[in-house]
Amino acid sequence: MSSNNKQTAIILILVAALVSLFWLYVGEQAEDFSSDTLTAAGDQKVYHWKLVTSWPKNYPGLGTAPENFAKAVKEMSGGRLLIKVYGGGELVPPLGVFDAVSLGNVEMGHSAAYYWKGKMPAAPFFTSVPFGMTAQEMNGWLHYGGGLELWREVYAPFNVIPLAGGNTGVQMAGWFNKEINSVDDIKGLKMRIPGVGGEVFTRAGGTAVTLPGGELYTSLQTGVIDATEWVAPYNDMALGLHEVARYYYYPGWHEPGPTLEITVNRKAFEALPKDLQRIVEVAARYANQDMLDEYTARNNAALNRLLDKHNIQVKKLPDDVLRHLRKAAYDYYAEVTESDPTAKKVYQSWKKFLDGAANYHRISEQAYINTRDLEE
C-alpha cells in the first residue's frame, strides 16, 4: 500500500472514531434531557398524584378549594404535576384522609387538623380552637409567627407535610332544634361538634358527636343529634340544614378562624423536582386565601336568603353561656398542655401570638368595626 493510501486509511479511521464518540455523546445527552431535572426545552416527566378530601365532591367552598388548588398546580407546572381530586368516601373515608397520606396510599389530602386530636393533642391549634384566632390572625401566626414550623414538627413523625389550605372565616355557632337561653339548656344536648369545640361542649354539659358533613341532614332530621355546627350560611344552605332545624345561633365561639390543611406525603414531596415543590407550596397559599375570599363574598347573600325565604330565626348565644364555654375552653388548655409537652410548646407559641394580635386589633380591626356601626 502506498504512503498516500495509508494516510487516507488512517484519516478515515479517525473520522469514524470521532463520529462514534459524537453519537455516544448525543445519546448520553438524550438520557439527561429526558430526566426529571429541568432542561432548556423538551419533554419533562409528568407526575400523577391523588388527593383525597373529607368533603363531598365539588361541595361549595370546601370541596371546590382542592379542585382549584389542583388546577393551579397544573397550570403553573405546565402540566408536569397532575392531581386528581377525590371526594370524601370515594377512595378513603372522610375521616381517613390523614392516615391515607401518612401511609403513602395517596400523595395528598385536604381536611382539617382538629380531626386528628386523638393522634396529636396539639393538632387542633392548627385548625381552630374555641375563643382563638380569626382567619387573618391564623395566617399571621402560621406564616410569620412560627406556627407553620411547629405544625410541620408535629406531623413529621407521620411522614406528612402540612400546608394551610383554606379558611372559612368566623363560623356560626350552629343549628338547634331548641332555644338556648341559659347554661342549663346545653345539658344533655347531643350536638355534632368536632375537635376541641366538642371537648369544651362536653365539659359544659352537652354531648359532642363527630360526624362527616354528608350525615348531618339525616342525623338532625331523625333526632340522632339535637344540634349541629357546620360552617356558615353559604355551606349550611348547601346541606339543607335550614330544612331540619329552626334556630340558627351565633357567634362561632368554637371555630373563629378555621384553617383547613393540605397534607403531602413526605416521600412523594421530596421526590419532586425543586420547582414543583415550590409550585405546590405557592398553590397552597393561593388556595388558602382564595377560599377565605369566596366565603366572605358568599355568606352574606346566603344569610339573606335564609332570612327572606326560609324564615329562619337567627339568634345570639347568651353571654352567660359564652362565658361558661370560654372557662371550659381554658380549663381544657391548661390540662392538655400539662399532660402533653408538644401541645404545651404549640400552645405557648399560639397564645403569645394571639395576645399580641388581639392587643393590636382592639385599636385597629375591632375598633374600626365598632366605629363603622355607630349611628348618625
Image (cartoon, rainbow, N blue to C red):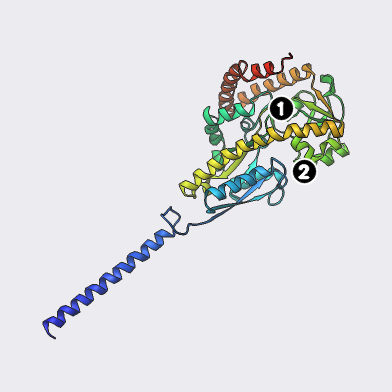
Q: Where is residue 15 drawn, in percent x and y?
A: 24, 73
Q: Up-down: is 162 above or below 353?
A: below
Is label 1 in a helix, a strand or a loop?
A: loop
**Residue at coordinates 83% horizontally, 39% vertically from top-left?**
219
Q: Report the residue at 80% width, 19% height from top.
A: 318
Determine the residue located farthest toward the top in the rendered image.
Answer: 376
Judge whether 42 appears above or below 68 on screen. below
Q: How far apart are marks 1 and 2 (CA)?
A: 21 Å
At horizontal 86% and vertical 34% (from top left) the residue drawn is 310
Residue ranking furthest to the bottom: 1
Which residue is the site of mark 1?
A: 254
Residue 46 vs residue 320: left or right? left
Image x and y of residue 356, in percent? 57, 19
The one of 193 and 119 positioned closer to us in this rendering: 193
Q: How crowded is mark 2: few (under 14 residues within 10 Å), some or many (20 or more)?
A: some
> Earlier along the polypeptide chain: callout 1 or callout 2?
2
What amino acid does circle 1 point to? His
Above or below for 39 versus 215: below
Q: Is residue 16 left or right of residue 148?
A: left
Report which residue position mark 2 lands on: 214
Viewer-nearest residue: 81 or 41:
41
Which of the labelled discs sits on residue 102, or is there none?
none
Give, as a three-letter code, the residue at label 2. Gly
Seen from the viewer's position, the closer of residues 120 and 62 is 62
Tell me if residue 138 can be seen: yes
Camera-side residue: 14 or 219? 14
Residue 314 sits in which quadrant? Answer: top right
How busy is the neighbourhood of tag 1: few (under 14 within 10 Å), some, or many (20 plus)?
many
Image position, residue 369 (x, y; %)? 67, 19
> Please, what secondary structure does the residue beneath circle 2 have?
helix
At which x and y percent is residue 50?
Answer: 61, 51
Q: State the residue at coordinates (77%, 23%).
A: 204
